[in-house]
Image (cartoon, rainbow, N blue to C red):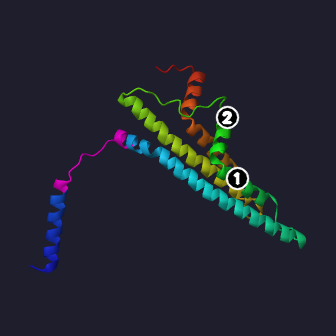
Amino acid sequence: MSDMKRINILLIATCLVASQAFAVSVPDAATMLKNLSTQVPTLIRLVTATSFVMGFFFVYKGLVEFKKFGEQRSMMSGEHHIAGPLIYLFVGTMLIYLPETVRVGLNTLWNSPNVYAYETTATDAWSSLTNAVYLVIELVGVISFIRGLVLLSHLGGQHGGGQQGTFGRALAHIIAGVLCINLYGFVQVISNTLGIQWD
């Protein structure tokens, strides 16, 4: 037998033995969601730290654009607009102060928002699954909110424009992010508006 065949047989035998030795049950979707939801607070802190870094980048870019604007204005050139640097500074500041920016967004849509209102002390499987889903959707909401702010920064691009519809997409991401962050409050508003009673 050639060396290559021996190596192949050895690899197949190792895989068969390992598959029997490490046989585990496949988790269902509910278990995966519950495991993911335990990591959501850490992931939200990671996303917030990333927004701080992006915010400092946008502030720096805004200051550089202000410098270019000042230099071109002194040479009587009309190519640069002040809107670009202002948008970069505005978006950078909002990303640096992301927790406060999210709080302002929540207070804009709700009188007294309580993001964690859906956390119950019930121990049944359905309640714990519902809490896990709400936490994962809250993480998606924070990411969507940040994505909306980054889309806003595209308005400060070359010649102060950006693609058509950029402002609408950015606003949609920001509003959807706020609604996802306080999904429980949003569901309560919809159910009260439509007269749906939850047990």
Q: Magenta segment, which residues? A: 19-32
- Mark drawn on residue 93: 1
- Residue 196 inside the magenta-drawn segment: no
Disc number placed over residue 11 in the picture, else none: none
Label 1–label 2 contact, CB within 8 A = no
Q: Position of residue 12 (x, y in %)?
A: 16, 65
Q: Would residue 155 appear left or right of 75 to someone viewing this image? A: left
Left or right for 80, reference 21: right
Image x and y of residue 19, in percent:
19, 56
Q: Which residue is mark 2?
A: 107
Mark closest to the chain's N terminus, 1 or 2: 1
**Rendered location of residue 34, percent (x, y):** 39, 40
- Quarter residue 33 falls in: top left
Magenta span contains residue 26: yes
Say if residue 165 shows up in the picture.
no
Mark 1 element type = helix
Which residue sits at x=60%, y=23%? 193
Give the left or right position of residue 81, taking residue 198 as reference: right
Instruction: Name the residue: 52% across, 44% down.
Output: 139
Residue nearer the viewer, 107 or 25 = 107
On the question of residue 145 being in view, the answer is yes
